[in-house]
């Protein structure tokens, strides 16, 4: 058991600087402002808890992939503006984890929110350099992780700094995420249905295998299905297929039984931009010069029927190239079926950045039991039952253990 922010005592909070890892890796608009503040809002329960407890939050996050050096277009300044507007408290952007920043965090007015500039501007963040971890840790008196989407990364801000500070606790968002995923891991009500889609199958093999052993139905669509169909000997024209894992996919198919459902028909087009030419074909009729970009109408009906009648659902990965309206139908059908299942009392969890966007665009996100802010983190946790950034947090009985020996 790891410590939780909600259990920290008044003395642990009041007047002390909370170094908080948040996930503000948000989509930015062409105007340079935050295009979708969902992930920022997801941190508010923890921030309010800290502010009300009299702590001084010092927030740190990454944004994009600046590769270890500053890039003005990936500054967190627009995020600071969103925080200031939404929380109605002063927000100070700190340039980097240096002496000046440390002094600012110690001397700042209570009620001020500090936001450290993009941690991936620092060389050594992603390699978990001990120097960087120490520099970050000097900005806080205790540590909180509320960056669920980054918990599968062993970086200086997620693991290194967490190991240097005590208390080190999970925030309210991470706690809620784990609660939903633990329910899927431990004792899901049956029928338990898992739906996979999205672009890459290679990093999802482990979970796919695990789910084939535990779920009643495993639906696979999206480009992920292409690789399985190809491994089953179908011709898929110019569709996105991961050639390097075809052998592994074939082995998986050998072990799979009737619980695995693959598309029966597909929507094809010459390429993702030529939606006007989209048409449905059987899986064994994909033309040599076409790409499979969505599941077909019969597959949609079949998948929707299975999803709508489940008691537990986990869904990761869009069923097609949903960024284009012509190929968004399969994903939308599944989103609506998920909402129907939820309305009937099923426990429904959707995880993944693109998947979360898809259910929001379909207007059903609020009706589902849980929409995870993390894709890779959710998948890794479901498979392994733990995450590197969680391991770095303080055990509930850490002091007892030390005292007993
Ligand atoms: P998530 O972010 O929810 O974890 P992924 O990142 O794994 O999902 O996959 C989402 C991407 O997969 C989207 O960009 C989508 O367009 C793409 N995709 C899904 N199906 C196909 C397909 N048949 N062909 C090409 N791209 C696809
Ligand atoms: Mg994605």
Image (tube, rainbow, N blue to C red):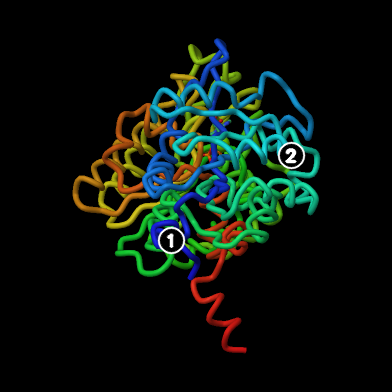
Tell whether 370 sits left or right of 398: left
Q: Residues within 10 Å of mark 2 (few under 14, many from 20)?
A: few
| Quarter of the figure that contains the C terminus | bottom right
Local SS, label 2? helix
The disc placed on residue 50 is none
For the residue carrying disc 1, how many other residues have a C-alpha within 10 Å: few (<14), some (14-19), or many (20+)?
some
Q: Position of residue 147 (x, y in %)?
A: 53, 46
> Residue at the location (46% across, 45% down)?
351
Instruction: Looking at the image, tell me whether mark 2 or mark 1 is earlier in sequence order.
Output: 1
Q: Secondary structure at mark 1?
A: loop
Q: Is residue 356 above or below residue 382?
A: above
159 and 302: which is toward the camera: 159
Q: Which residue is mark 1?
A: 8
Q: Is residue 265 visible?
A: no
Residue that mark 2 sits on: 99
Ligand 1, what quadrant?
A: top right
Residue situated in front as seen by the camera: 338 or 353: 353
Residue 351 appears left or right of 298 = right
Q: CA distance from mark 2 to mark 1?
A: 28 Å
Q: Position of residue 358 (x, y in %)?
A: 42, 31
Is residue 305 shown above or below 235? below
């Amino acid at each position: 058991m790891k410590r939780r922010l909600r259990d920290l005592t008044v003395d642990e909070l009041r007047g002390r600087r909370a170094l908080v890892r948040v996930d503000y890796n948000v989509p930015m608009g062409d105007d340079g402002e935050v295009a979708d503040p969902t992930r920022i809002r997801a941190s508010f329960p923890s921030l309010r808890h800290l502010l009300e407890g009299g702590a001084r939050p010092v927030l740190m996050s990454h944004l994009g992939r600046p590769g270890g050096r500053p890039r003005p277009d990936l500054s967190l300044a627009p995020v600071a503006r969103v925080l200031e507007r939404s929380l109605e408290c002063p927000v100070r952007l700190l340039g980097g984890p240096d002496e000046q920043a440390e002094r600012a965090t110690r001397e700042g007015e209570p009620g001020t929110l500090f936001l450290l500039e993009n941690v991936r501007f620092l060389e050594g963040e992603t390699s978990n350099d001990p120097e960087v971890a120490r520099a970050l840790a000097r900005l806080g008196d205790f540590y909180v992780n509320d960056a669920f989407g980054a918990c599968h990364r062993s970086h200086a801000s997620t693991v290194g700094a967490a190991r240097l500070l005590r208390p080190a606790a999970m925030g309210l968002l991470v706690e809620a995420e784990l609660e939903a995923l633990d329910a899927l891991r431990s004792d899901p009500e049956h029928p338990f249905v898992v739906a996979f889609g999205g672009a890459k199958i290679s990093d999802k093999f482990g979970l796919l295998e695990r789910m084939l052993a535990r779920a009643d139905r495993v639906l696979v669509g999206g480009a992920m299905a292409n690789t399985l169909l190809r491994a089953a000997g179908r011709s898929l024209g110019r569709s996105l297929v991961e050639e390097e894992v075809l052998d592994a996919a074939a082995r998986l198919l050998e072990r799979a039984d009737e619980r695995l459902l693959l598309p029966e028909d597909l929507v094809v087009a010459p390429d993702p931009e030529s939606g006007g030419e989209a048409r449905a074909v059987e899986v064994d009729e994909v033309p040599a010069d076409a790409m499979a970009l969505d599941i077909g109408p019969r597959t949609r009906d079949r998948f929707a029927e299975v999803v709508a009648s489940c008691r537990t659902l986990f869904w990761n990965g869009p069923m097609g190239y949903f960024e284009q309206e012509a190929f968004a139908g399969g994903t939308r059908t599944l989103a609506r079926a998920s909402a129907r299942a939820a309305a009937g009392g099923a426990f429904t969890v959707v995880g993944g950045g693109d998947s979360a966007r898809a259910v929001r665009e379909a207007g059903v996100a609020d009706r589902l039991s849980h929409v995870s802010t993390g894709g890779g983190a959710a998948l890794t946790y479901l498979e392994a039952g733990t995450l590197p950034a969680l391991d770095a947090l303080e055990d509930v009985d850490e002091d007892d253990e030390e005292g007993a020996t």
